[in-house]
Amino acid sequence: MSVPRLVIAAPSSGSGKTTVATGLMAAFAARGLAVSPHKVGPDYIDPGYHALATGRVGRNLDAYLCGLELVAPLFLHGSRGCDLAVVEGVMGLYDGAAGEGELASTAHVAKLLRAPVVLVVDASSQSRSVAALVHGFASWDPRVRVGGVILNKVASDRHEELLREALDSSGVPVLGALRRVAQVDTPSRHLGLVPVAERQAAAVDAVQAMAAQVAQGCDLDALEALARTAGALPAGSAPWTPAPPADHPPRSAEKRAPVVAVAGGPAFTFSYAEHTELLTAAGAEVVPFDPLRDERLPEGTAGLVVGGGFPEVYAAELSANEPLREAVAELALSGAPVAAECAGLLYLCRELDGRPMCGVLDATARMTDRLTLGYRDAVAVGDSALAPAGTRMRGHEFHRTVVEPGAGAAPAWGVRAPARRVEGFVQQGVHASYLHTHWASEPGVARRFVERCRTS
């Protein structure tokens, strides 16, 4: 039987989804429930706050990156053994991948999970109109069940009374009303919230404040009861597993597990939990390290994964760690597999904003005012440590930097939209690109990478 679950959505970004979802997770956890945290879409930052709230790994559910068929299995994998699951939505309830209709929207994922939706409404500048807004969202798609509303940024007791009166005849119950409280605000910068890893103590305080506000302002009993009305998942749904398929040749027990170093710390916070699980299942010993502090790669490193994050914020510190930059360059020069995404791409460049980086790639990187954002359909241009030529994957770009040139002599990907182009770099064992990908959609990526670690 699948776990009881709620999807926390909103009419638009900025309505308070993260505050409410994270607060609910923490408030339910404080009641002694094992809470499974999830986030719709490719966002890496919110799951860090979810993990603080629940003590469990925050996981993403992305129907574009992973495909429709993996949403329920990934949910079941993450929620195994839990009492309740809370899924934070993305953007507005019905906002999906550009030009793709409902694909990857919160509403789409709610339908795939057969989960009731709780609509978080910013009520700061309205009273009776809130009923029209809620009615519109609740009736737009009959297959999306809006089971309740939480009013956010309520100004006063009188304001709350007017809002509740307006919603009395809407058929959608009010399950909470929250005042604006300064201490639950979380700081943002050029790509969204500041990650937990950069403000650990302050983030803990913020999550505790969210939990207190939600526990005081919401009907937790009613919300838990609503979660238990979630429909059964489609017949045959089974938890996703990182284990290789039965027809995959077993690795020799005599072969030592290769060490795969995975960059972490404040500068490299963007990663999906499933990537580490896939690498481990493929036979690797995954060892994290912090490029801001560690002057050497982990002992015996045979492969390197450098994911996304904010190297532009820490460019001076990363550049100052010359011993590690030299170690990364030496590893890449040896032909060992190196997988770098976005921030990792910048770290491998010759320089970032004029500061020396690893120099693995003959390219420079710099900050700009322009935001590059969106899903991408990509195909591997040639063979690499991650995939053979012709492999199709979906990715996501989210950055305010530019790398010049944007592609090497052997590009990583051919991208179809928004304009046809090639991007990224493949040289020796290095695969570096702006595209964030979710390896659960193509688990052969992790197996190929680990096998190259054994043989390089």
Image (cartoon, helix red, strand yellow):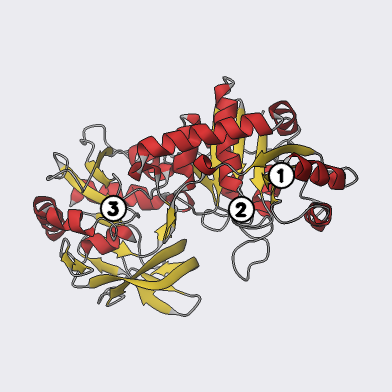
Callout 1: few (<14), some (14-19), or many (20+) C-alpha neighbours within 10 Å? many
Looking at the picture, tell me which residue is in the foreground, 216 or 197.
216
Marks 3 and 1: which is nearer the front?
Answer: 1
User: Which residue is disc 1 drawn over?
Assistant: 151
Mark found first going from the N terminus, 1 or 2:
2
Amino acid type of disc 1?
Leu
Classify mark 3: helix, strand or loop: strand
In x, y percent, where is residue 191? 43, 59
The residue indicated by pointer 2 is 68
Secondary structure at badge 1 equals: strand
Q: What crowding class fits label 3: few (fewer than 14 Cα within 10 Å), some (14-19), or many (20 or more)? A: many
- Mark 2 vs mark 3, CA separation in Å: 27 Å
Give neighbour class at mark 2: few <14, some 14-19, many 20+ (Cα, 10 Å): some
Q: Can the viewer see residue 98? A: yes
Q: Which residue is mark 3?
A: 306
**241 on left or right of 24:** left
Q: Residue 358, percent across and down?
A: 16, 61
Which residue is rendered at x = 64% and y = 60% of the image?
A: 103
Which one is closest to the eye, mark 1 or mark 2? 1
